[in-house]
Amino acid sequence: MHWSDRFSSVGPIGRLVSGATDPVSGQPELKATPVRVTRLATCWRGFLLRRSDVVLAGEFYWARVPLQRGHAFDLAGWEPLPSDAISQQWILGFLGVQPGGQLVTYADPGRGAFRYAILVEGRLEACLFLARDGAFLRSREHLAEMLGEAVDRRARRTLLAGAPPGVSSGSESGPIVCACFSVGLRTLHTAIAEGSLTSVADIGRALRAGTNCGSCVPELRAVLQHRSEAVTDRRV
């Protein structure tokens, strides 16, 4: 109910909820609309990272998450990937056509792994990772940190491997706690420790987590409580 068509391909589902509203607050009965749920099998999954926003359309699901350096899109499709080794035109629909841009490609049809990046003046403008039929999908954390950064020729193969040079796996942000601003658990713990954060408001000012839809606020409070108890135990 917090997602509009600016953040998800299924955001407009909110238009189908019951029109009944609370007589005092006007709040609609978002959680009282009967539904029937059927499992939808997916043929592929992936993610898209871009410095600029884009309007996606097609027979696939997407959800957008704002990043510090751009935008991340989680993707899933219920129709097979294009059979012609994934056409360049289809790929550029995700990555965008950049003046002077250079397309870097890695494709392993046997394993169902396809990875693409667009470099403009040697800097990472966008990348697209796709995994077919349950193939392993790399983490997007390293790549999100690389948006806008220079990538030399020797680093391009490493880039499409999902592990940019000079970035260790230990720097990943961890499981996402705040979906609105892509704040991970490891990032949260680090910010609390280094910034001596003691409240949800402190976290919001430092990381923006909890300042949009608010659905992660209970988790933020739990993290703060757990850390407070851990500090108390060490003192004792």
Image: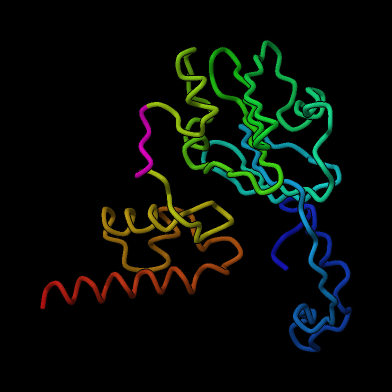
As displayed, is residue 203 above or below residue 225? above
- Image quadrant of residue 50? top right
Point 27% across, 73% down: residue = 228
Seen from the viewer's position, the closer of residues 198 and 179 is 179
As displayed, is residue 70 above or below residue 16? above
Look at the image and say whether residue 66 sits in the magenta stretch. Answer: no
Seen from the viewer's position, the closer of residues 69 and 90 is 90
Point 79% across, 82% down: residue = 29
Point 78% across, 48% down: residue = 77
Point 47% across, 35% down: residue = 145
- Image quadrant of residue 214? bottom right
Look at the image and say whether residue 169 sits in the magenta stretch. Answer: yes
Image coordinates for residue 116, horizontal then vertical, percent: 64, 27
Figure quadrant of the N terminus: bottom right
Seen from the viewer's position, the closer of residues 103 and 148 is 103
- Image quadrant of residue 53? top right
Most common secondary structure along the magenta stretch: loop
As displayed, is residue 169 above or below residue 194? above
Image coordinates for residue 189, horizontal then vertical, percent: 34, 58
Q: Which residues are magenta?
A: 166-170
